[in-house]
Amino acid sequence: MTLGEKLSKLRKEYNYTQEQLADILGVSRQSVSKWESDIAYPETDKLVKIGKLFECSMDYLLNEDVTKKQGLQPAEDENIWDKFREQLHERKSEKMVFGMPLYHIGRNAHGFFAVGLKARGVFSFGLISRGIFSFGMLSLGAVSIGLLSLGLIAAGVFSVGLLAVGSIAAGLFAAGAISAGFISFGALSVGYFSSGALAIGKFVAVGDHARAMIAIGQTLADGSVYSHIGDLTTADIQKILEWLDSNVPSWLGWAKEIFKYYIQ
């Protein structure tokens, strides 16, 4: 089996068009066609890329007597990311959606569905990911999930967003072990309105230890205007609601109404 025949066979097994393979290797489609027809032969650096892409040895590619594919032997010092990159075969759909491929899988992927080391798309999955729905170690999107996450709705170890959930979370609405937000819930909670084991708020704090203008605590309550330890009575709640209506600025009215609902 000639080099051209093997190359054509491998390309089809990996579901590439000649144009897609040419893009990966940085050559023209005509070059790939000539290689497969045995009219021309790839340069050495292209052969190395082909071997890595299709996970086969140079001996298999160049020796016509070798007809069984031989896999590459991993280097002793190869780490997990090297192995991941080798397994990340380039794939790109010819069908277009909103001016981008329906799917793209690759090291730098851009498609409606994108998967790669770096990924951009409507739905994106990658180490570094950007999309409307984004999932990755470093994630940015309308809905974002990752180790470090930034989005309208964000979830992760470290998260920032309008609605943020994480070990450390910051946002308009924040929930986490350590959280900061206009409305904040967490073991350590800081915000205009906060609730948690240790709650620190500008207007209201509810928790085991609470510090705010209005502090409602189970063990400690330090309030500059009102302090209460233990469960709230109906009269207590009414007093707090009246104070909120009188003192919370109008631009925080939405947060006030949410928190009023929470404490009732």
Image: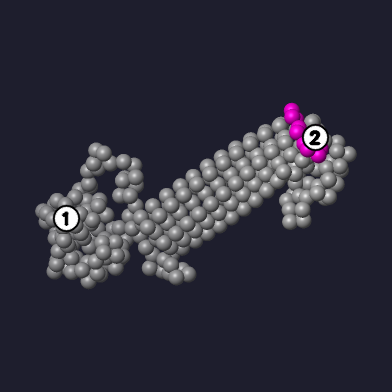
Q: Badge 1: how crowded within 10 Å, few (<14), some, or many (20+)?
A: many
Q: Would you call the spot at circle 2 few (<14 residues within 10 Å), some (14-19), or many (20 or more)?
A: some
- The image shows residue 246, relative to residue 18, as above or below, that is above
Instruction: Judge whether 157 appears above or below 66 on screen.
Output: above
Is residue 142 left or right of 13 when viewed as pictured?
right
Quadrant of the image containing the N terminus? bottom left
Dot 2 or dot 1, earlier in sequence: 1
Please check the rendered image and state whether residue 226 is part of the magenta-colored stretch, yes or no.
yes
Q: Is residue 246 left or right of residue 205?
A: right
Q: What x and y, as percent, mark residue 111?
A: 43, 63
Q: Residue at x 80, y 35 (%)?
A: 227
Q: Which mark is residue 61?
A: 1
Q: Amino acid at mark 2?
A: Ser
Residues rendered magenta in the picture: 218-228
188 above or below 56? Answer: above
Judge whether residue 261 can be spotted in this image: no
Give coordinates of residue 20: x percent, y percent: 31, 65
> Considering depth in this image, is 117 or 186 the residue closer to the camera?
186
Q: What residue appears at the point 42 percent right and 56 percent down from the top-left corner?
A: 119
Q: Residue 220 magenta-drawn?
A: yes
Q: Nearer the viewer, residue 30 or 60?
A: 30
- Residue found 53% across the figure and 52% down from its top: 150
The label shown at residue 109 is none
Instruction: Please report the residue visible at 20 percent of the width from the left and 68 percent of the height from the top.
Output: 31
Horizontal side of 102 relative to 59 (left or right) equals right
Alpha-carbon distance for marks 2 and 1? 79 Å
Residue 88 place in picture, x, y as percent: 34, 52
On screen, 93 above or below 230?
Answer: below
Tell me, for residue 227, which label it has, or none: 2
- Location of residue 219 in the rendering, given as x and y in whole percent from the top left corner: 74, 28
Q: Quadrant of the C terminus?
A: top right
